[in-house]
Image (cartoon, grey):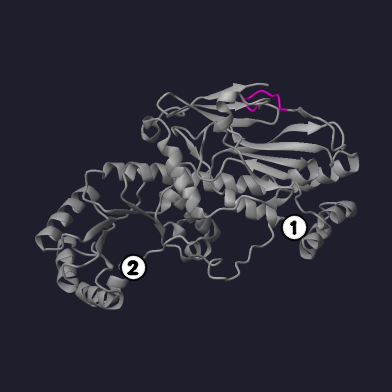
Amino acid sequence: MNAADLGLPVAVPSTALFTDQYELTMLQAALRGGTADRRSVFEVFTRRLPEGRRYGVVAGTGRVLDAVENFRFDDAMLAFLRERGIVDEPTLAWLAEYRFGGDVWGYPEGEVYFPGSPILRVEGSFAECVLLETVILSILNHDSAIAAAASRMSAAAGGRALIEMGARRTHELAAVAASRAAYVGGFGSTSDLAAGFRYGIPTVGTSAHAFTLLHDTERDAFRVQVEALGRGTTLLVDTYDVGEAVRTAVEVAGPGLGAVRIDSGDLLLVAHRVRHQLDELGARDTRIVVTSDLDEYAIASLAAAPVDAYGVGTQLVTGSGHPTCSMVYKLVARADSADPAAPLRPVAKRSLGGKTSLGGRKWAARRLDTEGVAEAEVVGTGPVPGELAGRQLQRLLVKAGEVVAREPLEAARERHIAARAGLPLSAVQLSRGEPVLPTEYVEG
């Protein structure tokens, strides 16, 4: 249950200044030049995946919908723009009435993507679409990077529980977004209460080393925690001597102790020793939780360890070495006039240095092999081949400015599990390699 389920208001501030100045200066020039109302199509895609990644994960779509809906300039914002002389008075008057009235299509949240996948398509006038570039990219680049790292960690965990606990390792607002993206990517809970309040993600938490050090003895700390939180709590056992702490923990809580947490040392070795000791003490159902700078490789290395859950912080909220997905927002088609009936024509950047793009409004579909496993990401312009018509990936998200595709966060999480399962098995290998699916282009 989240704040909305409880009937509580969740303030969503205007996103209108989450933008770069050049978007407003382009708007002013287009208004003056008479091109602002030309029907246009922008697409979000990435030219490549981060090095070594086999697939990407679409995350942040729900936040993008909120951002588009709340992209409105209030009096204080307009006064700021006027005081700084950023745009002229006619442009300020236009911004005062701004409401996005176009259409947005995109891959549903939780879906996987590959180089060239048209993850999001924004259609409307040039003026209304160009303003959304920065806020859309900032959300999708961040959230998709976190979700991709979470997905790799989830695959490495092999069904064991994953706890997101990176709030202290990133910006306080980014921490909430990271918790959301991690949940989409396969994590089951978070330590961040703001994420739990806003998005309904399950929250967990017990104590840190400071709580143990506060007390005269470790036994006193354990006793107080069990009395306050019950025998099902998780006791941190590596403040002093792990073996002694485990023995004390079971003596205090009894064999019904919920879990112990290990936060340092050789986790593989210590986990085996702790499991053996817990079993000897009769605490066979007590779980072992490990933390301490884990990433997908560390999690995979613990596959043979008797670990029940992993708590991940820094590496998760920084994208495990890849904090952005390098997505771009490019104009791919536009009309030659402001006439609503004017046909669209493809446009694309043509330059050296690997930054060229394919013009035209694009569709995307995933072709399956005879076993029902994905074998290619097919991206095209023009008619969709009949055999791919039922495999199209884009969905209508916004129609004439109205959001039409909001869904529970759980739906995105379940979609990702299914999407990843539909890829070749090599998708979840941690060894470096190329994207697990090739991208094929079909021009109409």
Any mark on residue 223, and which?
A: none
- Among the two numbered marks 1 and 2 on one chain, the one whose residue lies closer to the N terminus: 1
Any mark on residue 72, and which?
A: 1
Q: Mark 1 and 2 residues: CB-CB less than 8 Å, in contact?
A: no
Query: In this view of the protein, which residue sits in the foreground, 9 or 134?
Result: 9
Q: Is residue 144 above or below residue 115?
A: below
Location of residue 16 in the rendering, given as x and y in whole percent from the top left corner: 72, 55
Write down the quadrant of residue 421 in the picture.
top left
Amino acid on which the number 1 mark rests in the picture: Arg
**Image check: 194 left or right of 83?**
left
Q: Decide whether residue 350 is among the magenta residues.
A: yes
Q: Is residue 89 above or below residue 42?
A: below
- Secondary element under disc 1, as helix, strand or loop, is loop
Residue bounds of the magenta highlight: 348-356
Task: Provide the residue designation for mark 2.
Answer: 206
Alpha-carbon neighbours of circle 1 within 10 Å: few (<14), some, or many (≥20)? many
**Image check: 261 left or right of 276?**
right
Q: Is residue 229 above or below residue 187?
A: below
**Who's the residue at 48% across and 41% down the image?**
322
